[in-house]
Amino acid sequence: MSIRAKIRASEEKKVTQTRNFVRESIIEKINISCTFMK
């Protein structure tokens, strides 16, 4: 595996982790606001 391919793979991994983190925090915010609405 070339260095460039390794860098690309790690960048994609970071992007995926960031997306998952953002999605989870958005879901948590929605759940919290839904709880307050009750």
Image (cartoon, helix red, strand yellow):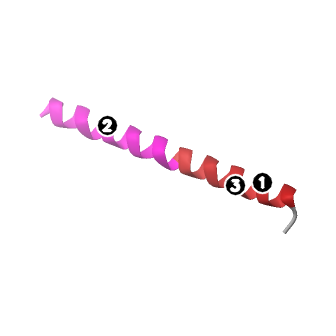
- What residue is drawn where x is 63% and y is 47%? 15
* In the image: residue 2, left or right of residue 18: right
Q: Residues within 10 Å of mark 3 (few under 14, many from 20)?
A: few
The residue lying at 48 percent from left, 41 percent from top is 22
Residue under pointer 1: 8
- Which mark, by number, is residue 35? none
Q: Nearer the viewer, mark 3 or mark 2?
A: 3
Q: Are marks 1 and 3 in contact (CB under 8 Å)?
A: yes
Q: Quadrant of the C terminus?
A: top left
Magenta residues, as a range? 20-38
The furthest residue to the front:
3
In terms of sequence position, does the residue under pointer 2 or pointer 1 come before the other?
A: 1
Is disc 2 placed on a helix, strand or loop?
helix
Circle 2 is placed at which residue position?
Answer: 30
Q: Tell me the residue at 47%/45% (across/down).
A: 21
Magenta stretch encompasses residue 31: yes
Residue position marked by numbered label 3 in the rendering:
10
Alpha carbon of mark 1 to alpha carbon of mark 3: how far? 6 Å
Label total for image: 3
Residue that appears at 85% across and 58% down: 3
**Secondary structure under the numbered disc 3 in the rendered image:** helix
What is the C-alpha distance between the residues marked 2 and 1? Answer: 33 Å
Q: Amino acid at mark 3?
A: Ser
Report the amino acid beneath label 2.
Ile
Q: Residue 5: x percent and y percent?
A: 83, 60
Displayed quadrant of residue 2: bottom right
Check residue 22 for magenta coloring. yes
Estimate how packed mark 2 is, as few (under 14), some (14 to 19) or many (20 or more) residues with alpha carbons within 10 Å.
few
* Residue 3 as seen in the image, left or right of residue 10: right
Among the two numbered marks 3 and 2 on one chain, the one whose residue lies closer to the N terminus: 3
